[in-house]
Every structure is written in C-alpha cells, then in structure tokens.
C-alpha cells in the first residue's frame, strides 16, 4: 500500500488530468480485485430445462437464486432439436436438469445422463404427475403417454412442486425461499385455472381437431372435446387417405375449428379446412411460449393468450 501511495502522489504531481484518471483506475484495479475476491461471484444454481414452460417454472421457484437455460428455442421442434456447443457446456456445469419426459424430447435423457455429474439433481415433469392422470396417445399402440402435461394448470402444480423439491435438494441453504416462491406461484396457477374454467364454460362449441395430441389434458380439464389429431405421432404426416378421413370426421362431427401450432407448418390443417367446404377455420396456438414475445414470455401469459384465441374460434 505504501508503494501504491507513492505512485499515486507522483502521478498527481506530474500527469495531465486525462492521463491522471486513467492511471488511477489502472493502479486501483488490483486493490479492488483483492477487496472483492470471493465476494459477489455468481453462485446461483445453474438450471437447464428442455422447454420454455418448464424453464419459466424454474425461474419462478428459484427467483434471483437461479440461472436458467432453456434448451429448445422458440419455433424449434422439441422432438428433434439438436443442442448447440454452448448449451452442452452449460449442461456440463449445471446443478439441476429439468426435462418433461414422456418422450417429448427423446434426445434429452441420453444427453443428461452423459453430462450430469454425481451431484446433479434431475427432475422429470412426467414423473411428477400422478400416473392415473396420464393419458395414452391414440395411435401409439397403447404404449406412449401424451407428454403435454404442462398445458393443464392443475397438473402444472405437481411439476412446480417437483422443481421446488429439486432446488431444495440442490441448495438446502435456500430451501425456505424456494418453498415460499413455489407456494406463491402454485396459488397463481390456481387463479389461472379458475379463469380458464370460467372462459371455457362460455364457449358455444366445444369440439376441435388439433395438429398433435397437444391439448388432450387441457380439453379434459375444461370440458372440451379434441375429436381428432392431424399427426397421431410426432413426425408422422397423414397420408391422403388419413386426410380424407379427417375431412369426413369434420363434416360428421360438426367440427368448425382446427388448432395448428406455431412450431409446425399449417399446410395440412389448411388443406383439411378447404376440403371441408370452407366453413372450418384454422387457428394457431402456441403450447411452448416465447421469451422474446411479450404476449407469451411467461407460462401464465402464454396460456391466457391461447385461451383468447380459443375464445375467438369456439366462443
């Protein structure tokens, strides 16, 4: 410190004002670094989640104590997404890995196994939902559960609680904060559930066709009827015969709405609508959200936006 004081005195006596300011900053950097060494470092939990709704749950439960990385970006298909090099590096350092499970992101299980360390906590949303609440996908031969559990706010509560427990395990010192945040957010999910139930009860028609089995849990929760899907299994485009069957179903069941998804080309949905006599509308829903879109940059806003679109189509 004595040497530093002599250096500063010499600079003050001999240097122009501009050089004085620069020199003082340079000389003080080692002192500042020494004073803050070990303090103010980012010791937040590193959490990786495969899809945005789960990442948003993590952010709500963890608050300022977590750094959350969403693996599948907006507009990408969860089933076939490939991780970037930067994401792989994040996974190698992650304290907690959160995936949907139920074969939504089949690539995640193997990657998480390879990158996760001995102390890494893993939470699987599909395992948090009671098995009796799960629904089998119609065209899977009875062997695959529908993975879209987060789209039922009531089931989402189970997922949030599992994330809470995972964070408490990964960072026991902050367990009280995680529990408080989770309790507050579960209450907000309850309020969302009540609002959706009120809106859906007023829909004048309750039948629709979906691009995937995406809205199975949502429909069951709110008394709607998903009478058919365009792609029974991910990536399995319908044949000409299957499209004709869907057109017949639309006409026979009085369906007037097809819900496509922002993450997929709506061409087949539009074809079915056109061949059904032109009275069927195609509306785009977003089951994954987008942190860059103020209308869907949280799970709550994403769900409310989807219900607004449903109301326009079914109301």
Image (cartoon, helix red, strand yellow):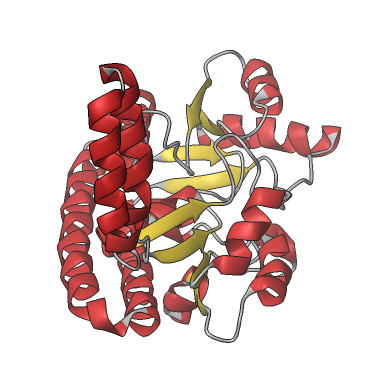
Rendered location of residue 9, percent (x, y)? 23, 39
Rendered location of residue 268, percent (x, y)? 71, 27
Give the quadrant of the N terminus: bottom left
Q: Is residue 48 above or below residue 177?
A: above
310 vs 138, left or right, is: left
Q: Which residue is drawn at 24% across and 49% down?
A: 5
Give the quadrant of the C terminus: top left
Residue 60 visible in rendering: no
Residue 45 visible in rendering: yes
Specify the quadrant of the image occupied by residue 167. bottom left
Q: Which residue is drawn at 50% across and 47% down?
A: 226
Specify the quadrant of the image occupied by residue 132. bottom left
Q: Residue at x 64, y 27 (%)?
A: 269
Rendered location of residue 63, percent (x, y)? 26, 58
Q: Which of 92 and 128 is in front in this view?
A: 92
The extreme top residue here reads 278
Q: Which residue is drawn at 61% across and 15% down?
A: 277
200 vs 302, left or right, is: left
Q: Which of 30 and 172 is in front in this view?
A: 30
Count of numbered tags: 0
Q: In this view, does 177 lie above or below 243?
A: below
């Amino acid at each position: 410190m004595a040497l530093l004081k002599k250096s500063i005195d010499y600079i003050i006596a001999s240097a122009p004002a501009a050089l004085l300011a620069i020199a003082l900053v340079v000389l003080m950097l080692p002192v500042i670094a020494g004073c803050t060494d070990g303090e103010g470092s980012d010791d937040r939990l590193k959490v990786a989640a495969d899809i945005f709704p789960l990442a948003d749950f993590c952010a709500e439960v963890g608050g300022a104590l977590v750094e959350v990385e969403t693996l599948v970006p907006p507009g990408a298909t969860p089933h076939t997404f490939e991780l970037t090099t930067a994401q792989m590096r994040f996974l190698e350092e992650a304290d907690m890995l959160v995936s949907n499970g139920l074969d939504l992101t089949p690539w995640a299980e193997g990657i998480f196994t390879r990158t996760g360390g001995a102390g890494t906590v893993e939470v699987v949303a599909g395992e948090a939902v009671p098995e009796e609440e799960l629904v089998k996908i119609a065209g899977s031969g009875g062997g695959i559960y529908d993975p879209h559990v987060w789209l039922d706010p009531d089931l989402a509560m189970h997922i949030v609680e599992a994330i809470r427990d995972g964070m408490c395990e990964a960072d026991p010192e902050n367990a009280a904060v995680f529990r408080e945040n989770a309790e507050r957010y579960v209450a907000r999910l309850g309020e969302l559930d009540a609002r959706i139930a009120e809106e859906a009860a007023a829909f004048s028609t309750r039948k629709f066709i979906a691009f995937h089995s995406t809205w199975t849990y949502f429909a069951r929760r709110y008394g709607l009827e998903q009478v058919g899907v365009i792609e029974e299994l991910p990536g399995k485009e319908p044949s000409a015969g299957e499209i004709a069957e869907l057109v017949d179903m639309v006409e026979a069941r009085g369906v007037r709405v097809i819900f496509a998804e922002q993450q997929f080309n709506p061409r087949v949905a539009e074809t079915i609508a056109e061949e059904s006599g032109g009275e069927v509308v195609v509306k785009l829903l977003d089951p994954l959200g987008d942190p860059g879109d103020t209308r869907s940059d949280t799970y709550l806003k994403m769900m409310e936006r989807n219900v607004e679109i449903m109301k326009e189509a079914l109301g």
